[in-house]
Image (cartoon, rainbow, N blue to C red):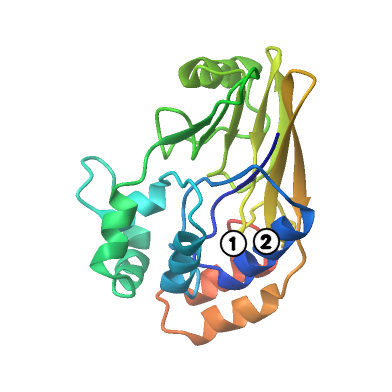
Amino acid sequence: MRVAILSDVHGNVRALESVLADVRSRGPFDATVNAGDLAFGGPRPREALEMLRSVGWPTIVGNTDQWLAGDIPGVEAPPALAGVREWVRRRLRRDDLDYLRALPMAHRIEPAGGPSLVVVHATPLSTTDSVDPDAPAAVLSTMLEQARTRHLAYGHIHRPYVRDVAGGMVVNVGSVGLPFDGIPQPAWAACTLAGGRWHAEIVRVPYDGEAVARELAASDHPLGELFARRVRTARMD
């Protein structure tokens, strides 16, 4: 069984188009899963959301999806990003916000006769907690226990990695639209079930990131210059 997992498109349509083409070229896959953060940040939030909705993949909720959807107790954008939130919301329809509000926290893949693979945005219990690539093995083991699996995929931190943990695997699939590992190329993960366990490969995809940065800088995006720099450098700041 083969599963493609992508996450954190963040309104970057050019990056999404490149990843979709790459997934098709490396297919077929038995399933493709979107691990959240669909629209917030990039220059074309509505177009990215429409493209992701049109493919019909299982999709889980990310923290910025919750910021946009609103009406979720205890979940709101940081004050520094409140302007971006409103800028994006003005470009989405009520139906888009309803869609984001209804997204689940996790997606579970249960192959016949094989171990499960669970996909979350940040952790099984939170869309906001950050688990870094060098997190202690005990932290990753706790995530596996919370997800009731030995194989877990997540996004959120925008820094892809694969680690063997407690007889299983944890993979961060990286970010399509805003990598933060210093490599300005979209990332996604190809997961394969073989020999009774899941294995993962991180895939990087070239694209015209400079065009996205220029689009952001020239727009009325409240933090266009900041997000343009993030696209160019693949760094948070």
Q: Nearer the viewer, residue 203 or 41?
A: 203
Residue 181 locus on image (x, y percent): 69, 51
Mark 2 surroundings within 10 Å by alpha-carbon count, few (fewer than 14), some (14 through 19), many (20 or more): many
Counting from the top left corner in percent of width and height, residue 155 is at: 56, 43
Q: Quadrant of residue 81?
A: bottom left
Q: Quadrant of the N terminus?
A: top right
Res 234 seen here: yes
Tell me what residue is drawn at x 46 percent, y 53 percent.
37
Question: Tag 1: Cα neighbours inside 10 Å, few (<14), some, or many (≥20)?
Answer: many
Could you tell me which residue is drawn at 71 percent across and 13 percent down?
167
What is the x, y in percent for residue 23? 70, 56
**Residue 230 image position (x, y, % from top left):** 60, 65
Q: Is residue 131 left or right of residue 102?
A: right
Q: Nearer the viewer, residue 213 or 144?
A: 144
**Residue 194 in which image quadrant:** top right
The correct choice, above or below, for 233 with respect to 215 in the image is: above
SS assignment at label 2: helix
Label 2 amino acid? Val
Measure how far apart labels 2 and 1 are at the Cα level: 10 Å
**Which residue is denoted by mark 2 in the rendering?**
19
In which quadrant is the C terminus drawn? bottom right
* In the image, residue 118 above or below residue 205: above
Residue type highlighted by circle 1: Gly
User: Is residue 78 in sight in this rendering?
Assistant: no
Q: Residue furthest bottom?
A: 218
Residue that mark 1 sits on: 177
Name the residue: 64% across, 67% down: 15
Q: Quick one: label 2 or label 1, which is nearer the N terminus? A: 2
